[in-house]
Image: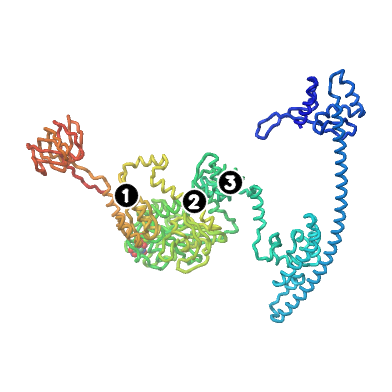
Amino acid sequence: MNDSSNSGDKTLTVTPSKTLSLKRPVEQGMVRQSFSHGRTKAVVVEKVKRRAHEPAKGPAPAAAPAPAAPAPAAPAQSGAPARPTVKAAAPRPQTGVVLRTLTDEQRDARARALTESRVREDEDRRRQEADARARAERDARDRVERDAAEARKKEEETRLAREAEARRRAEEEARRRLNPSAYPAAEPDHGLTFAPTGGSRSKPQQIIFNTARPAGAPASATPAAAQTPAATESRAPAGAGAPRRPLTAPKLVVPSVKPTRTGAMKDRGRLTVTSATASDGEERTRSVAAFRRRTQRMKGVVEQKERLSREVVLPETITIQELANRMSERAVDVIKLLMKQGQMHKITDVIDADTAELIAVELGHSVKRVAESDVEEGLFDTPDTEEQLAPRPPVVTIMGHVDHGKTSLLDAIREANVVSGEAGGITQHIGAYQVVSPLGGKITFIDTPGHAAFTAMRARGAKVTDIVVLVVAADDGVMPQTIEAISHAKAAGVPIIVAINKIDKPDAKPERVRSELLQYEVQVESMGGDTLEVEVSAKQRTNLDKLLEAITLQSEVLDLKANPGRPAEGTVIEARLDRGRGPVATVLVQRGTLSVGNIVVAGSQWGRVRALIDDKGLNCVHAGPSFPAEVLGFNGAPEAGDRVAVVESEARAREITEYRERQKREQAAVRGGSARSSLADMMSQLKTAGRKEFPLVVKGDVQGSVEAIIAALEKLGTDEVAARVIHAGAGGITESDITLAEASKAAVIGFNVRAHKEAREAAEKLGIEIRYYNIIYNLVDDVKAAMSGLLAPTLRETMLGNAEIREVFAISKIGKVAGCLVTDGTVERGQHVRLIRDNVVVHEGKLSTLKRYKDEVKEVAAGMECGMAFENYQDMRQGDIIECYRVEEIKRSL
Ligand code: GDP
Ligand code: MG
């Protein structure tokens, strides 16, 4: 355009400078264009007025200069068409303004262009009209043909349907004759609407293709025309209820087909372009999703995944993997996000909750922050309503001084004798059992190995015992452990029943026991107090009924109740690893009912209750409140005193036990005094810095005895040396115990257990000592002796003699040798020496060489000369004094 206007200019250059003004009429302007990236740019915009078709307009020299011309023409438009010509002729000489004037050639050219364009327009119109006529004719022809085709097809299809029907009936008939019962009633449904069986299925297809072709062929002049007949034609077969897959435009068929024959639709499967054009239905078809994916890939559009916003539970720390899992996102996406924030992480890295929250929010999830301990929430102590509660048997613990007859009494009550089977007279198996009181009702007895265990259980939050039976031997009176038992019971707020035992003994003085008890604020009934007391003899089985009656009376006062209709809660009384049965835990159910199949959690162990065994060794299905039962099915042996709870799912059980396991590990790490422990730990370490430790791995048959051993060992410790039990547990000694012992240079102690074969071999190989015991006292004594060995021995110096260095020789291979004179006493090879220079000890060490002339000698007496050399020390000088002394070690014991 510009070019052409320029060329127009050129022709005008002869005229005065004003000719330049011809350009003016092009409306020009600056437009400031601003871009999305924030920059702007000034753009020159030219607006050229389009010339309207004005027949009277002056002629243009060619089509080209026309754009330059319209402006002068524009004002003329309002007036008569003649005016421009007048102006063009007249003002030219006067004003010299060329604006309104056109040369003759220009005028001619314009006129010519105008007429030409008019002719062109006329032609166009004519052509269009002709086209329209032709199209109308064609359409009419098509319609006639189509109608004919439809009619033909309809005929064909009704015929087909009839055939199919006949065939189907024949087949049905044949089949019915062959197998009258097996033919289902549903089949006719299919048949009615031409669902021919396998062989015939392809046939209609063929036929349709044939019918479709003649209809389509004549119309196929344009692609558009071809499609219309296909569409209309498709409607026809639908009405007739005919075949599938015949069409090139299958989608159009579907809606019309649907209402009439759903059965057939089902048979056919998905109707797609490929399946429609393919010869048989066996080829694989692309799924809709695949197709969409493909088109998207081609378009380069990344599909926005449907995002599910989740509530993500975030503990204090979480691994990236776990976080990704909880958000249902890919871990790599999480890592990518972290990278964007400049943090490089691996999938297994642990991140804190704040970071995790940032990520979760970024990915469009909501966050629920939880403290780790929240997993235990609601596990215990959910309250019961008053009406749910039912009376429950009392749980009784028997306590008292050693050998006052606790086990005998328990056994007498149970009428079983395990005393003889016990080693060392210490109750090594805590058990529990139920008896029936003479007053009716049941009583549950627990045998604990000691008061410490009782309190340890209480410390873990398990208040198991309702009543304490304090056994005091009538011939022995109140003893230290009796006092202990009283204070433990009082601390727990548990009522005491005093059983004065061994009244069959001739030297029994029950009155003395009563008065002695007064000192410890236990006032028995006969002394005017409210503590029940019974004189019994475990041996003679006297007054056992009275004891049981007293217990029942006391429990009635306590009004013990529990809700049996809830998930069980209880406490582990003892736990051990049984060779055949795996981990076995004796659990006292305290609330609710424990049933086989329940998922239980105890401490850091969980399991599904495989079997419940009562105190008589019988299997039971349920265990109600106050019922002690052995629980089989734990993954590992829990610890005595661990609280047991039934949880709703394995997942919850795992969550809780994993949390507890983690906590245990952390606590163990703190106790182990690793370098990474807290300041407080370091302080306590400093205090015991000089303390030597005697590391031990203790394995026992039951948790109760292990606890007793640990307590006994702890008491051995002094400021200087202490036993440190790095691992303790119930069960045999395993390879892992040995490796643990090796790592911490510990000794392994087995109490009533033996090492597995592999463990034994490993221990031999690694030189780890395993010691077996069945009596706690022996064990403690041995450990005491061993620990004594760790005590720093007292060192005693004995002065041997002095020598003075006269000269120092440097001898190759040996190094420096001092030539000395022994001034007093003797000097012995291998003994300790001090090198004293100007009364200051400059070196302490041992004598490595002692020579007299050329011979190596054992000792040199005073007044003689000798050559001396030190171990690892060369800097002797003339005039130094060598002091020789003997060090004797004196062993100490605890
Ligand atoms: P524990 O340490 O408190 O469990 O006491 P034991 O039950 O092991 O009993 C210690 C000893 O006292 C055993 O030798 C029993 O035979 C004995 N003994 C227990 N009860 C009686 C009793 O009523 N009369 C007599 N004469 N001896 C008893
Ligand atoms: Mg005992």
Q: In this view, does 330 lie to the left or right of 713?
A: right
Along the polypeptide, which appears first: circle 2 or circle 1?
A: 2
- Give the distance between the C-alpha atoms of the residues marked 2 and 1, in whole angstroms: 30 Å
Q: Can residue 502 be seen in this view?
A: no
- Give the distance between the C-alpha atoms of the residues marked 2 and 3, in whole angstroms: 18 Å
- From the viewer's perspective, is residue 874 above or below residue 594? above
Residue type, mark 1 in image: Phe
Q: Where is residue 230 in the image (x, y as percent from the top left)?
A: 78, 60
Q: Can residue 538 be seen in this view?
A: yes
Q: Name the residue under label 3.
A: 368
Query: Is the C-beta of the residue carrying label 1 under 8 Å from the nearest atom of ligand 1?
Result: no
Residue type, mark 2 in image: Tyr
Along the polypeptide, which appears first: circle 3 or circle 1?
A: 3
- Give the distance between the C-alpha atoms of the residues marked 3 and 1, in whole angstroms: 46 Å
Q: Mark 1 points at which residue?
A: 694
Q: Name the residue under label 2.
A: 659
Q: Nearer the viewer, residue 217 or 894?
A: 217
Q: Residues within 10 Å of mark 3 (few under 14, many from 20)?
A: few
Q: Residues within 10 Å of mark 2 (few under 14, many from 20)?
A: some
